[in-house]
Image: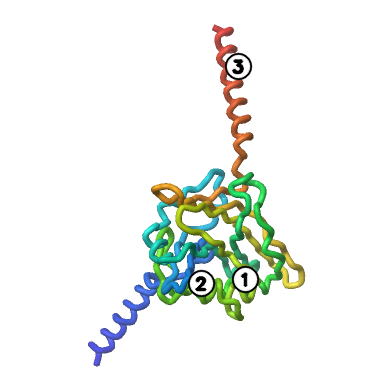
Amino acid sequence: MKKLTTAALLFGGAILVSQPALGQFVNNDLYMGFQNQAGGGTEDYMINLGAASGIVGSSSVVDLSSDFSLSDFNGVLGTSTSLLGGVVAGSNNNQAPDLYATQFRSGGAGIPSVPGSSSPGTFYKGDLFLGYSDIGQLALVAPAAGAGVLDTSRSWENYVEPKNANGTFLGDMGINPDAPVGPSTVLYEDLWYNSNSSSTTKIPFTYKGYFTLDLTGSSPSLTFTPSAVPEPTVLGLLGGASLLLLSFRRRLGGKKA
């Protein structure tokens, strides 16, 4: 009996240890999902891009290309002309829950500090809790940071988009994070963020930057451009100022010699 009890405990412990490998939704990790519901797809493709703080808070363009698998993307695409994909994230912080969601960026890259889409709206604290509970249902298939997974249960379709019903992100929040993308195309999506500690005052989403998924070349490219990244003209001015300062210092040094 003692041996059976010990074996049962060991087995139970093994299950507990292995659970994170089966899927674990990590608060404020950015999850990118692709679905082919309209094309009759049999699986979704989901990627964990890592912690939002390390991506959104960057001062330069973040290269996420190594997280993206073209073969998995094409596997979900099948014979369709395009997929629908987007990014969501969130946390259920008791003081101030938060959510991230993408919106289709019209006009391409543009200026990093200026959004190319409209804000998803304004929400109470309770709304954000509800949105988090929806995307939290991705937990059973959510991959680890930097990894992707093909999901035959199609969790993105059932809990994020396109299913428009209670218990889904689209149905409860009225936000569709997905936009179409196909072979040999470029997708631009703005990332929006909302955190609210109030149950009586609505807070709007704020713009954080944009994703670029470029499938036009021989190798796919996935990047995030934070809104704080200087514009090319600004970089040029800064570079010119640095050269002038260096030249001035050299001349000053020459005179002293």
- Amino acid type at circle 2 is Ala
Quarter of the C terminus within the rendering: top right
Decide which of 229, 96 is in the foreground and name it: 229
What percent of the width, then of the height, locates residue 189? 58, 56
Q: Residue furthest right?
A: 200
Residue assigned mark 1: 94
Mark positioned earlier in the residue sequence (1 or 3): 1
2 or 3: mark nearer the eye: 2
Residue assigned mark 3: 248
> Left or right: where does residue 58 sit relative to residue 8?
right
Relative to 233, is 92 above or below? below
Q: CA distance from mark 1 to mark 3?
A: 55 Å
What percent of the width, then of the height, locates residue 235? 60, 34
- Amino acid type at circle 1 is Asn
Q: Is residue 156 visible?
A: no
Q: What residue is shown at x 40% (from left), y 68% (from top)?
A: 150
2 or 1: mark nearer the eye: 2
Residue assigned mark 2: 38
